[in-house]
Image (cartoon, grey):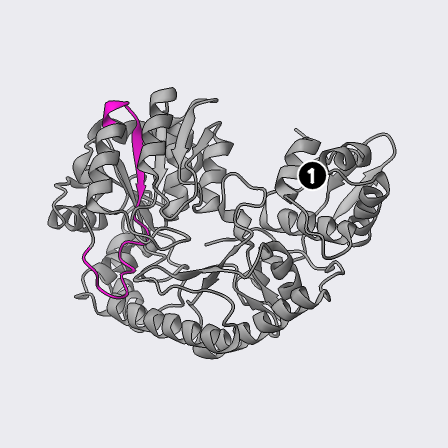
């Protein structure tokens, strides 16, 4: 089924135009970046040139040039009588480029935030290999997870003051596997879902794909506007709420204990099932005291976790702690698409959880080094960018000297630096997020230094008006 993008929706994605350059180039760049980061899907049909011109308040000549630029860049196909559609040329190396493994070693991918394997990871694989004969004596199908891992995770929650039985744990293929499964199982088409105004975009994509309608909180000093939440819940029924209370992605904010109490009370009162994403909780770089899990205040809440953030992205182990009455429906729904997560990966993760915390500590130490190095490089070379120091997580959420995130990302790509524009993290789209950029520090100091140097050049290009031509490259949407 072809997705049709209305002129009004595309205008919202493009946002308010600036007056310091050719409009057709600015519009073309914004459409290209939106297609690259997933806001505009491959194959989606665009509005006519006349409709887009009217929605943007520009001339028909301008939108004609926009579509011509996009066709020349290989990003749009136009056929007489059928209109114009997004057409992303998927090169075999696109995914590798985004994770920094492209054969073009001059490209730096800062589109993802996932650490390399920390010291001690190899030992966990070795110990798991020693236990492999016992695993091979089984079928390997584990729709709810490896028993020893489920026991360890249940003990982890119990030790945190959230009594948990192993039967409440379901192991998935990463946290995204858990989010997608919950969305497919718990949502009916048209159900409303309360979400933060800025958040992890792939999670929101999964909720929308399952038929959910997002009720996004306003974006302010905190991701969690309690008064707006109360008003929104009172205005209509919501089936789910998706929240990241610990080192929120992308802002790294932490929800206070008082806020958790208020949220838990309101969600319980309105019968809303909370999905609490704690994937970042263990990436506590400064060892700050975190409030108890929101799920400890709301027995109906589902808690998510992941091995990717505190350990390694290639270890595809996620999990859910769910109320007992949801276990069987989730396991049955999961088996439609995915009979089991990798049994060996689960064994490796179990070894990591029983090594006394040494591997996790080594990973946090490396991330602290990267965070502090990136902050120092930005302060020295790009002082006009404001970069607060987060106590945890994997990214800096920086404020730019103007509404230029999309243009800056386009200019950076031409300098060999791949970035994700701020609006990708905002549910409302448009110009929301144009003053922000997420910069991951899960890279070596050398790569961070080079990345900041290219960011400096790209910002100079934008501010001097040199970032005007479309890049010919494309990449797929991979935001970890």
**In this orientation, which residue lies closer to the viewer: 116 or 400?**
400
Q: Quadrant of residue 98?
A: bottom right
Q: Secondary structure at mark 1?
A: loop
Q: Is residue 291 left or right of residue 212?
A: left
Kindly identify which residue carries mark 1.
Answer: 43
**In this orientation, which residue lies closer to the viewer: 430 or 412?**
430
Q: Is residue 272 left or right of residue 196?
A: left
Residue positioned 23% across, 35% down in the render = 262
Q: Quadrant of the N terminus?
A: top right
Magenta-highlighted stretch: main secondary structure? loop
Q: Quadrant of the C terminus?
A: bottom left
> How far across and down, in percent of the image, does residue 74 sit?
77, 52
> How far across and down, in percent of the image, does residue 213 sit?
47, 28
| Residue 218 visible, this orientation | yes
Q: Residues within 10 Å of mark 1 (few under 14, many from 20)?
A: some
> How far across and down, in percent of the image, does residue 196 sit?
40, 40
Q: How many marks?
A: 1
Magenta stretch encompasses residue 287: yes
Residue positioned 40% across, 76% down in the render = 373
Residue positioned 34% across, 59% down in the render = 393
Q: Quadrant of residue 226?
A: top left
| Residue 334 visible, this orientation | no
Residue 82 drawn above or below residue 203: above
> How far across and down, in percent of the image, does residue 414 sit?
68, 66
Q: Quadrant of residue 453?
A: bottom right
Q: Is residue 278 left or right of residue 213?
A: left
Q: Is residue 86 left or right of residue 128?
A: right
Which stretch is magenta? 268-289
**In this orientation, which residue lies closer to the viewer: 145 or 71?**
71
Magenta stretch encompasses residue 98: no
């Amino acid at each position: 089924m072809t997705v049709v993008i209305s002129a009004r929706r595309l205008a919202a994605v493009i946002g308010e135009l600036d007056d310091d350059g050719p409009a057709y180039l600015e519009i073309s760049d914004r459409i290209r970046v939106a297609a690259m980061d997933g806001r505009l899907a491959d194959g989606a049909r665009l509005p006519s040139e006349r409709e887009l011109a009217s929605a943007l308040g520009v001339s028909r000549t301008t939108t004609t040039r926009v579509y011509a630029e996009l066709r020349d860049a290989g990003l749009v196909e136009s056929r007489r009588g059928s209109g114009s559609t997004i057409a992303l040329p998927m090169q075999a190396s696109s995914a590798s480029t985004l994770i920094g493994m492209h054969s073009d070693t001059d490209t730096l991918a800062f589109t993802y935030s996932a650490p390399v394997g920390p010291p001690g990871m190899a030992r966990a694989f070795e110990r798991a290999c020693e236990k492999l004969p016992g695993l091979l004596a089984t079928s390997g199908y584990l729709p709810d997870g490896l028993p020893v891992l489920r026991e360890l995770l249940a003990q982890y929650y119990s030790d945190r003051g959230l009594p948990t039985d192993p039967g409440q744990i379901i192991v998935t293929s990463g946290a995204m596997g858990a989010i997608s499964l919950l969305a497919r199982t718990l949502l009916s088409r048209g159900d409303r879902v309360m979400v933060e105004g800025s958040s992890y975009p792939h999670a929101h994509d999964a909720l929308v794909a399952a038929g959910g309608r997002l009720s996004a909180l306003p974006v302010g000093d905190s991701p969690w506007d309690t008064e707006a939440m109360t008003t929104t819940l009172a205005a209509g029924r919501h089936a789910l709420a998706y929240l990241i209370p610990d080192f929120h992605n992308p802002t790294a904010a932490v929800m206070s204990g008082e806020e958790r109490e208020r949220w838990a009370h309101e969600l319980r009162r309105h019968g809303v099932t909370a999905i609490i994403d704690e994937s970042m909780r263990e990436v506590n770089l400064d060892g700050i005291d975190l409030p108890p899990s929101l799920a400890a205040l709301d027995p109906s809440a589902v808690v998510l976790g992941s091995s990717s953030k505190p350990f390694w992205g290639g270890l595809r182990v996620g999990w859910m702690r769910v109320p007992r009455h949801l276990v069987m429906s989730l396991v049955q729904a999961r088996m439609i698409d995915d009979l089991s997560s990798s049994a060996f990966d689960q064994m490796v993760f179990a070894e990591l959880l029983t090594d006394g915390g040494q591997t996790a500590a080594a990973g946090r130490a490396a991330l602290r080094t990267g965070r502090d190095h990136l902050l120092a490089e930005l302060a020295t070379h790009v002082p006009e960018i404001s970069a607060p120091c987060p106590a945890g997580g994997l990214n800096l959420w920086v404020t730019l000297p103007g509404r230029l995130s999309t243009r800056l990302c386009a200019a950076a790509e031409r300098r060999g630096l791949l970035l994700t524009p701020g609006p990708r993290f905002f549910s409302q789209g448009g110009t929301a997020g144009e003053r922000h950029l997420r910069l991951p520090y899960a890279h070596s100091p050398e790569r961070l230094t080079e990345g900041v140097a290219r960011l400096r050049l790209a910002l100079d290009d934008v501010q001097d008006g040199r970032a005007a031509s479309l890049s010919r490259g494309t990449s797929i949407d991979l935001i970890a």
